[in-house]
Image (tube, helix red, strand yellow):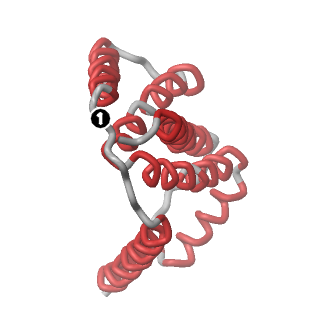
Amino acid sequence: MIDPLTIFSGITLSIIAAFCFNYSIILNKKGLLQGLPDINFDQGVKSVVKSFILFFKNRDWTIGFFLGVIGYLPYLISMNLVGIVVTQPVTSVGLVVLVYFAHKKLNEKIGYTEIASIALMIGGTILIAFAQVSDIFIEILNIALSLILFNLLLIGISICLYIVALK
């Protein structure tokens, strides 16, 4: 059994990560609504690169992008402290942040279905809190290396598929 301070720290870091991930989505959409261009793969790689340059020139979109990237640090530390069984459900509660700011900053409508879904999600996360958290041992370096390798592989496959699609 993990000591309560470690559990509290892990859950707190998971909540911070959830905020970073979900608020970054709000900032990305806010940037897109300011007139950023569509990414058009039909016009070639040069067009895609030009689009991304315009994306990074937009303040809201850029802050959202980096906020999402920064969120991985507390997420990885939280997984190291309390494991993915606790970290991931707590992170999913960050959708409350997404819905709240989508309503406040983007003026999106929230219906009864969304409210009921949020209530069920929070209830499920609270039930996980009653479970006993076992001692976790994860080497964060292995997770980071795996994440980097996975992303490189994904980018490589995407480039290959893009080249094949051009022919």
Pick the front one: 112 or 57: 112
Pick the front one: 160 or 127: 127
Residue at x 40% of width, y 62% of height: 138
How far across and down, in percent of the image, does residue 134 sit? 32, 45
How far across and down, in percent of the image, does residue 153 sit? 37, 79
Q: Is 8 situated left or right of 114 in this image?
A: right
Label 1 neighbour load within 10 Å: few <14, some 14-19, many 20+: few
Query: Tag 1, which secondary structure?
Result: loop
Q: What number of labels is visible?
A: 1
How far across and down, in percent of the image, does residue 109 sit? 42, 18
Q: Is 52 situated left or right of 94 in this image?
A: right
Viewer can see residue 93? yes
Q: Which residue is under mark 1?
A: 132
* Quadrant of the image containing the N terminus: top left
Is residue 32 shown above or below 38?
A: above
How far across and down, in percent of the image, does residue 105 sit? 59, 25
* Quadrant of the image containing the C terminus: bottom left
Q: Give the quadrant of residue 9.
A: top right
Residue at x 34% of width, y 15% of height: 115
Q: Give the quadrant of residue 166.
A: bottom left
